[in-house]
Image (tube, rainbow, N blue to C red):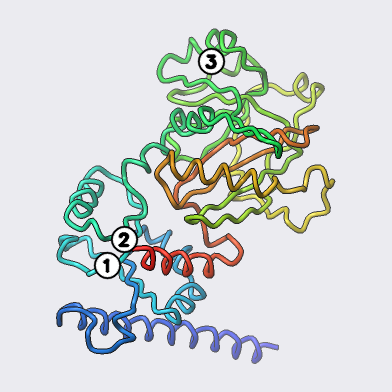
């Protein structure tokens, strides 16, 4: 058994080494072609789609998985790491710049680059990304949309923004008419902390700035809707369980939770009540995604959606995330390679 294990482990290592060697060869060919004045040596090289990426090491590991790189390479897509020690304008040429870095300096670099390279697709515009990093403005876009058709309605939970004085939270909650329990989230969406406040006394212990969101029972399941351009993929995830009136009276204080929708196991294969497991209607999601792409100015994001428990067609968007963990999305490598190729064809 040990020998078999060692053989399997060795094979896996060899595959990783082989992939790294192929990446190095591709990088050298790309660099040589760029220095030599482009990809003119061969017709195949001329068709290459070059995606420059500026991602954290964690994001590189989760997104640039071997299955994506292999499929991309077979379709003529080359991923090239952007060197932060060199001017961005001196690098490339790129067809697409894919990024998820924070900081004003990087934003300025990217904005300057985009002005001088308008033919390059930047995923996504820095100003548009900033919009969804603020939970106050993030969901307002959905609220303004007020989507309702024959397939259902889409809204947002009642919510309240507290920026400074924690002693005013209780009065503000009562004035806004928010009902307990209340979901507590940081105002800045870069943090995925989540808490649930069960009673009024606990509200004054909270530390602003934050968003208070009325908790809606939803059967303990949320729908994570991944959007990549015009492509949509929906998966189920276990979420916070419903809170009964009895539990509300029994519990007190504030309970902190991990990144619920990310850490939770997939609910796609779980034996659930059909009324809870049923996915939102496709036409409803397509219209919602189309409207948000236009209003947000983003092409890479996901929505956390819940359906009110006991309702067949009343949905709520509770969070929007830019460039989420696509590596967990089934078949993401096919969706992204088609997406990158489509961007270049549409120019």
Left or right for 122, reference 187: left
Q: Is residue 123 above or below residue 342?
A: above
Q: Which residue is mark 2?
A: 97
The mark that comes first in sequence, 3 or 2, is: 2
Q: Residues within 10 Å of mark 3 (few under 14, many from 20)?
A: some
State which quarter of the image contains the N terminus.
Answer: bottom right
Left or right for 57, reference 254: left
Q: Are marks 3 and 1 in contact (CB under 8 Å)?
A: no
Label 1 secondary element: loop
Label 3 secondary element: helix
Please state which of the two labelled residues, at mark 3 or mark 2, is closer to the viewer: 2
The mark that comes first in sequence, 3 or 1, is: 1
**In terms of image quadrants, where is residue 54?**
bottom left
Residue lying at 62% horizontally and 17% vertically, measured from the top left: 178
Give coordinates of residue 60: x percent, y percent: 41, 64
Q: Are marks 2 and 1 in contact (CB under 8 Å)?
A: yes
Give coordinates of residue 195: x percent, y percent: 59, 32
Q: Is residue 180 above or below residue 143?
A: above
Q: Residues within 10 Å of mark 1 (few under 14, many from 20)?
A: many
Residue lying at 45% horizontally and 28% vertically, measured from the top left: 136
Q: Which residue is mark 3?
A: 204
- The residue lying toward the viewer, choosing from 107 and 113, is 113
Left or right for 143, reference 58: right
**In terms of image quadrants, where is residue 209?**
top left
Residue lying at 39% horizontally and 36% vertically, measured from the top left: 131
Give the CA distance from mark 3 to mark 1: 51 Å
- The residue lying toward the viewer, choosing from 161 and 228, is 228
Mark identifier at residue 94: 1
Give the CA distance from mark 2 to mark 1: 7 Å
Give the CA distance from mark 3 to mark 2: 44 Å
State which quarter of the image contains the C terminus.
Answer: bottom left
């Amino acid at each position: 058994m040990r020998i078999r294990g060692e053989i399997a482990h060795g094979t896996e290592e060899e595959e990783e080494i082989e992939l790294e060697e192929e990446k190095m060869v591709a990088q050298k060919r790309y660099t040589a072609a760029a220095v030599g004045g482009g990809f003119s040596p061969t017709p195949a090289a001329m068709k290459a789609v070059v995606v420059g990426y500026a991602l954290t090491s964690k994001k590189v590991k989760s997104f640039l998985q071997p299955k994506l790189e292999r499929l991309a390479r077979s379709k003529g897509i080359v991923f090239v790491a952007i060197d932060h020690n060199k001017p961005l304008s001196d690098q490339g040429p790129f067809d697409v710049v894919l990024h998820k870095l924070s900081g004003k300096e990087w934003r300025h670099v990217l904005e300057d680059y985009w002005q001088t390279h308008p033919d390059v697709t930047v995923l996504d515009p820095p100003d548009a990304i900033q919009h969804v990093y603020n939970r106050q403005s993030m969901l307002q876009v959905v609220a303004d949309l007020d989507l309702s058709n024959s397939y259902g309605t889409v809204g947002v939970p009642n919510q309240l923004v507290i920026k400074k004085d924690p002693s005013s939270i209780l009065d503000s909650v009562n004035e806004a008419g928010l009902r307990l329990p209340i979901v507590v989230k940081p105002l800045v969406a870069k943090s995925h902390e989540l808490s649930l406040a069960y009673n009024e006394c606990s509200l004054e212990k909270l530390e602003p700035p934050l968003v208070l969101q009325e908790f809606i029972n939803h059967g303990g399941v949320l729908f994570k809707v991944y959007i990549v351009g015009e492509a949509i993929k929906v998966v189920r995830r276990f979420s916070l369980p419903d809170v009964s009136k009895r539990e509300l009276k029994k519990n007190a204080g504030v309970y902190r939770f991990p990144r619920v929708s990310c850490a939770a196991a997939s609910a796609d294969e779980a034996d659930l009540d059909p009324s809870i497991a049923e996915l939102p209607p496709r036409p409803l999601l397509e219209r919602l995604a189309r409207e948000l792409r236009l209003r947000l100015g983003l092409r890479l994001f996901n929505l956390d959606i819940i359906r009110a428990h006991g309702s067949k067609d009343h949905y709520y968007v509770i969070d929007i995330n830019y460039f989420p963990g696509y590596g967990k999305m089934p078949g993401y490598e096919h969706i992204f390679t088609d997406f990158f190729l489509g961007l270049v064809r549409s120019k």
